[in-house]
Image (spheres, rainbow, N blue to C red):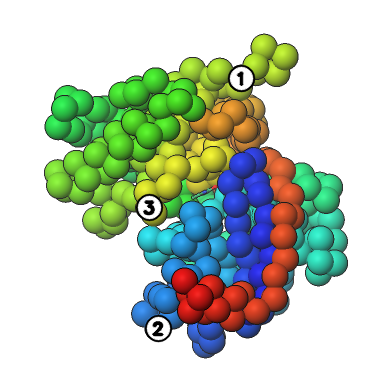
């Protein structure tokens, strides 16, 4: 298996270039189901160090650059904003694509990565929307937490206030609080559309960027399904936030939003409205290649035999 690693605003991505499991043809959704049903050990082995894996696939449409299935240690993801940036930067680094716009098929729809430079990418995400507003979830020891349920390529609960101050020294307590919220959502039957599990929890607070670099609109903390927090501001979580801001009339089409992560990294974001009135977010950030490896599965087998 040949892989390339990258970092996007603090969050790692591991792209499988070739040698991945044979998933057959069909839609990216069907191939994602095949990955989970038949090759879950491969998915786990690639992503178990707390990174997001991206399996490069042949696209269905000739106009697409590639198909991609994102996953982490817990299972497959719908979309992943930071990893799409890592994907585009990695393919450019290898000389597989030029600067400019590239369409990628994902299991939840096609997205576009506009590679502006070797590192700067604007990702036009899938249509995003708020499913439920002002939902109250009762969390033991925390009381009622009010938030919105929204889709940004994954399902999010966006809490209106963070139960713990959004400071890096509180990451342990934030992770625990967000995990409790996620458990409470499931226990109280609060879901996304069609009963979909809400597997990402997002807390918001005021931005805390350094005085020499002001201008973020909000800081977030995002708990991912594998129990790890997102070091980046989370592309799909930022998309879900834009959908909520749009629904509340707090952000107009084309208006900029700067989302800061708990680590202080940032994504710029804005949205357009489709002809049908749906929110189509664009998330802008930077990614850097950090490593390349050949024979990853052989290395993992040797490491596990030696330990
Ligand atoms: O950037 O969309 C994102 C993301 C999802 C999970 C981790 N990062």
Secondary structure category for the residue under label 1: loop
Q: Position of residue 120 (x, y in %)?
A: 76, 44
Residue 296: percent from left, percent from top? 61, 75
Q: Is mark 1 within 8 Å of ligand 1?
A: no
Residue at the (84%, 56%) spot, across then down: 99
Q: Is residue 11 depicted above or below 76 in this figure?
A: above
Q: Residue at x 63, y 65 (%)?
A: 15
Q: Is residue 57 left or right of residue 192?
A: right
Mark 1 crowd level (few <14, some 14–19, many ≥20, 10 Å Cα)? many
Q: CA distance from mark 2 to mark 1?
A: 44 Å
Q: Which part of the image, by quadrant, shows the N terminus?
A: bottom right
**Pointer 1: what residue?**
209
* Quarter location, residue 141: top left
Look at 40% across and 64% down and name the residue there: 75
Q: Position of residue 307 (x, y in %)?
A: 47, 71
Q: Is residue 288 visible?
A: yes
> Which residue is labeled 2 in the image?
38
Q: Residue furthest front?
A: 306
Return the mark for residue 132.
Answer: none
The answer to which image quadrant residue 2 occupies is bottom right
Tag 3–tag 1 contact (CB < 8 Å):
no
Q: Tag on residue 225?
A: 3
Label 2 with label 3: CB-CB less than 8 Å: no
Q: Is residue 37 above or below residue 136?
A: below
Cα distance between the residues tagged 2 and 3:
20 Å
Of 245 and 307, the residue lying toward us:
307
Of the numbered discs 2 and 3, the one sitting upstream in the chain is: 2
């Amino acid at each position: 298996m040949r892989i390339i690693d990258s970092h996007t605003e603090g969050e790692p991505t591991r792209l499988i270039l070739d040698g991945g499991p044979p998933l057959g043809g069909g839609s990216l959704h069907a191939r994602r189901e095949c990955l989970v049903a038949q090759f879950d050990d491969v998915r786990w082995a690639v992503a178990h160090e707390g990174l997001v894996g991206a399996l490069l696939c042949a696209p269905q449409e000739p106009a697409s650059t590639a198909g991609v299935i994102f996953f982490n240690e817990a299972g497959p993801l719908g979309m992943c904003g930071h990893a799409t940036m890592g994907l585009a930067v990695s393919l450019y680094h290898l000389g597989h694509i030029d600067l400019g716009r590239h369409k990628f098929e994902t299991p939840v729809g096609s997205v576009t990565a506009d590679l502006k430079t070797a590192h700067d990418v604007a990702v036009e995400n899938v249509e995003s929307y708020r499913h439920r507003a002002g939902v109250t979830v009762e969390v033991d020891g925390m009381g009622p937490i009010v938030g919105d349920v929204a889709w940004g390529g994954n399902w999010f609960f966006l809490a209106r206030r963070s139960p713990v101050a959004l400071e890096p020294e509180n990451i342990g307590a934030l992770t625990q609080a967000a995990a409790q919220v996620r458990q409470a959502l499931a226990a109280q039957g609060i879901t996304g559309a069609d009963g979909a599990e809400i597997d990402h929890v997002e807390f918001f607070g005021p931005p805390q960027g350094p005085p020499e670099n002001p201008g973020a609109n909000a800081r977030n903390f995002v708990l991912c399904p594998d129990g790890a927090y997102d070091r980046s501001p989370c592309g799909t979580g930022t998309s879900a936030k834009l959908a909520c801001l749009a629904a509340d009339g707090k952000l107009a089409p084309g208006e900029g939003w700067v989302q800061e992560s708990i680590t202080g990294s940032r994504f710029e974001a804005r949205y357009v409205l489709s002809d049908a009135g749906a929110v189509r977010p664009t998330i802008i950030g930077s990614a850097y290649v950090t490593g390349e490896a050949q024979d990853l599965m052989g290395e993992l087998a040797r490491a596990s035999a030696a330990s």
